Image: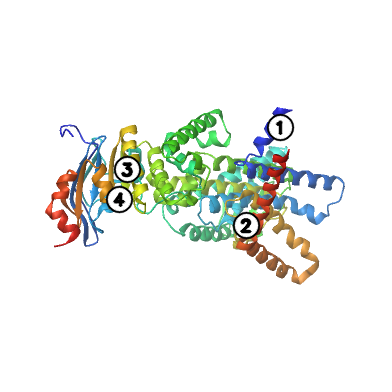
Amino acid sequence: MSENRTPVLDVQGLGIDFGGLTAVNEFSLQVFNEEIVGLIGPNGAGKTTVFNMLTKVYKPSRGTITFCGKNTEKMSVVEMNKQGIARTFQNIRLFSNLTVLDNVRIGMHNKISYSNFDAVFRLPKFYEQEEKVEKEAVELLKIFGLEDKKDITAGNLPYGAQRRLEIARAMATEPKLLLLDEPAAGMNPQETEELMDMIRFVRDHFRIAVLLIEHDMKLVMGICERITVLNYGMMLAEGTPEEIQANPQVIKAYLGE
Amino acid sequence: MKKIKSFFRALFDRKVRSRTISFLIVILGYIVVEILLKSGNLSSMFQSLLVPVTCYMVAALGLNLNVGVSGELNLGQAGFMSLGAFMGVCVSGALAPVVSNTLLRLLLAIVCGALIASVFGFLIGVPVLKLQGDYLAIVTLAFGEIIKSLINNLYIGFDANGFQFSFVENKLKLAPGGKALINGPMGATGTQRIATFTVGIILVLAALIVIYNIMYSRSGRAIQACRDNRIAAESVGIHVANTKMLAFVISAALAGAAGALYGLNYSTLVPAKFDFNLSILILVYVVLGGLGNMTGTIISTIILVLLPELLRGLQDYRMLIYAIVLILMMILSNNAKVREFAESMKQKLTSRKREEAANE
C-alpha cells in the first residue's frame, strides 16, 4: 500500500468514556481504498465499540473521524451511511419478518427518489424505479448466492445465509467502506472458507475498502492486508499479518504470560 | 380472452392476493347490502349500522398501519376521530348556506377532518416518535382524554360576522341568524345528516388503496424495517423518526376522515362518545383481525360491530356472550394446534390442485 494516497477512513486519537469507564482510548487507524484491514483483540477489548463509533451509534468523547476527506463530527448514523459506510452486526440484525428480497431493497432505500405521492397514485415513476431496484437487488442476491431464496422470510434462512444476506444488504447501500463485525461467527470451516472468498470478491468487484472484526485467525491472517490489535481499549500493535503473528505483546495479550 | 385470464391471474398473484381479497370483500359487501336495501330486507337497526361500520373500518385500518405495520401502540385513535368528527360537523354546518350540494359538502368535511387530525398527529409525533419504547401509547392515551375534555368545554358559533369560540361556559354572542355549531358537553346538535353508506364504502376503498400502496413501496418497506430492527434500519440510512411519523400521520388522518363521516351521520353528537373505550374497541378490531393484516381488520370489524346487535335478543347477557365470543376468537386464532390444522388443510388443498393439474 502506498502511504501517500489519501485514506478512505482516517481515525485519529479516538476515545469514548461511559461514565467513568474509558472503553476505548487513543485509537488511530487508516484504511485505504480496496484494502482489507482486520481489527482483532481479546473479548471486551472494545472492537465493537470502535465500530459503533465509526457508524455514530455512539458519539466519541475524543478524537476525529475523517471519511473521504470529510470531517464527520456532526453526522448521525443515517448520514454516515449516506456518506458511504455500511456495516453488519455481531448478533445478526436482519428485518426478519420481511423477505430476503425486501431486506436488500430496504438497503437501497436512499437510491429511490419517488415520493409517497408517486407511490399512492402508482405513477409511472414508481414502476420505473421499483423495476430497476428489483433488478439490482436480484443481481446483488446472485452475487451472494441467495437468488433462489429471494421470496423466503429472512428469519427462516439458515444461519450462514443470514450472515450473507446481512452483507448483501450492507452492499445495497453502495458503500465505500464495509464494516464486518465477526462475519464468520458460528460458521463451520467450510463456510468460513467460502466467506473468505466472498469478502475478497466483494472487495475486488465493488472496489471498496473492508474493515473487519474477527476471532477466526485463519480468516484474519488469510485475507487481511493489515491488522490492528486492540486490548483493554488501547492499541497494542499494528502491522501485516506476519508482523502481528510475531509480536510478543500480541501473543501475551491472547495467551497470557 | 387470454388477456382477461392473465389479468385475473395478476390480481391473485401471491404477492398481492391479500390486497385483491380485501377489495373484493368490501365491494361484495357493498353489493349485498345494496341489494338487501333495495329489496327492503334490511331492518332499520342494521341500516343505522351501515355508516358507523365503514367509519370504524377506516379508523381500524389506519390504526393497523400504525400498530401492525409500524409497531407503535396508539391508544388514542378515538381522539383523532373526535377531532375529525367535530371539525367535519363545523365545516358542514358553516358551509351549509354556501354549498348546497350535500355530497360536495361531505367530501369537504372529510378532507378537513383528515387534515386537522393529521396536524395534531404530527404535533404529537414530533417529540414522541424520537423516543424508543411505549411512549406513544402513553401520550396518545392522554391525548384522547385531553381532546375529550377540551371539546367538552368548547363552544363554537357562527354568524354573519364570522366564527366565535369560547372555552368558558357559553359566552357566544351570536347575531340573529347565527348558529351554534358545538355546544360544550351537549356537543353538536341539529347537524344535517349527510353521510351516506356509499361514501363510507368509497372511503374504505380509498383507505385500502392508500395503505396498500404505501405498504408496498419504499416508505412501506422502511416502516416495516424500523419495526423489525431499528438499529439496522438506521444503519442502512433510514431516518427512523420520520418513517414512523409517516405511518402515524396517515393513521391519524384516516381516523379524522372516519370521524368526519361518523359525525355527519348523526343529528346529535356528544364529545363523550369518543372515549377511551372506543379507542380500545378499535384496537380490538385490529388485534383480532391480525396485526398488519388489512383483510383481517375488515372482517373482524364487520363481525364485532354486528355481534352485539345480533345478540340483542339476549338482553342483559349480551355483553357477556360478546366477551366470551371475543375471547374464544382470540384463543382460536392464536392457537398453535388450530393454526397447524389450518395450515395442513391449506397444504392438502393446494397439493390436490397440483395433482389435478398434473393429471390433466
Please tell me how crowded label 3 is: few (under 14), some (14-19), or many (20+) other residues with Cα within 10 Å. Answer: some
Q: Position of residue A5 (x, y in %)?
A: 18, 32
Q: Nearer the viewer, residue A20 or A185?
A: A185
Tag of residue B5:
1
Determine the residue positioned at 16% across, 46% down: A238
Say whether residue B224 is left or right of residue B234: right
- Observer-side mark, 2 or 3, equals 3
- Select label 1 or label 2 by which is in front: 1
Host chain of mark 1: B
Q: Looking at this rendering, what residue extends furthest in the left direction?
A: A248
Q: Which residue position is annotated with label 2?
A: B282
Crowd class of label 1 (few under 14; some 14 to 19; many from 20; radius 10 Å): few
**Residue tagged 3:** A196
Establish whether labels 2 and 3 are both on one chain.
no
User: Closer to the camera, B324 or B204?
Assistant: B324
- Crowding around mark 2 (Cα neighbors within 10 Å: few <14, some 14 to 19, many 20+) is many
Q: Which label lies toward us, 1 or 3? A: 3
- Circle 2 SS class: helix
Q: Residue at x 50, y 59 (%)?
A: B137
Numbered disc 3: what chain? A
Instruction: Tell me how far mark 2 sits from mark 3, CA to CA.
Output: 52 Å
Report x, y in % for residue A114: 49, 33
